[in-house]
Amino acid sequence: AQSVTQPDIHITVSEGASLELRCNYSYGATPYLFWYVQSPGQGLQLLLKYFSGDTLVQGIKGFEAEFKRSQSSFNLRKPSVHWSDAAEYFCAVGARGNTPLVFGKGTRLSVIA
Amino acid sequence: NAGVTQTPKFQVLKTGQSMTLQCAQDMNHNSMYWYRQDPGMGLRLIYYSASEGTTDKGEVPNGYNVSRLNKREFSLRLESAAPSQTSVYFCASSQTGYGYTFGSGTRLTVV
């Protein structure tokens, strides 16, 4: 069965600092991988996705993520965090076809001045 | 382009009452999903519909029923609400090979 682990429940970074959010997945074949962001009181917005090909994927809002098959990881990065990036971030894994996504429990990001 | 529309946005129910959460998408997506979000639990799948005319249970289906009314609409029904069903409910839709588009959620409180 698929599963996703986001080891960090809450991370605090200073504005302008770099960010890395960790995501580890368990899945037997090559997965579909996603990162979503949820601002307070809002729905989830897709940041980026990996299906195949280049293991470094670029997303919206200056985010990128790297798929590392050997480590079963799909970590999200941003070189310089802005205060507006404060939100909750969810990693998700899916199989090819219409199998529903499995989500991690999320990482809450706080940004301080 | 509205995307995924959920109604209502907020609801308070008494224990034992019933209600239906509505979800509609205008993107011609085949698949639709209902998740619930609870603090520290992430999103857990309640039911999904891979295509019009089919529905399947997810991780936490007990106490819920669904109807895929047509390609656009996928409703979630609570027949007898319980305090454990206090949650934020999200509907989402997708086309095969793409990520989900989420609605803005329904915040449900059962007292």
Image (cartoon, rainbow, N blue to C red):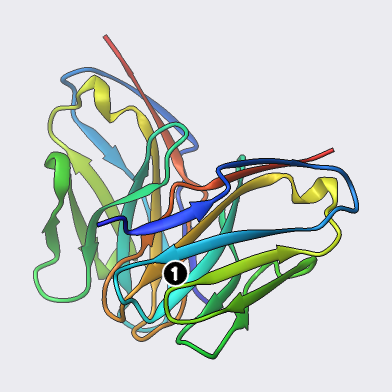
- Look at the image and tell me in which quarter the C terminus of chain A lies: top left
B88 relative to A77 in the view: left or right: right
Residue B1 percent coordinates (x, y): 24, 57
What kind of element bears circle 1? loop
Residue A26 screen position, x and y as percent: 45, 70
Q: Nearer the viewer, residue A106 or B49?
A: B49
Q: Residue at x 43, y 53 (%)?
A: B103
**Position in image of residue B102 (x %, y %):** 40, 56
Residue B42 visible from this viewpoint: no
- In the image, B25: left or right of B11? left
- For the N terminus of chain A, which image quadrant? bottom right
Locate residue A32, reporting x and y percent: 31, 73
Q: Does A90 appear above or below B99?
A: above
Height in image: A53 above or below A81? below
The amino acid type of the residue labelled 1 equals: Leu
Q: Residue furthest bottom?
A: B53
* Residue at numbered disc 1: A101
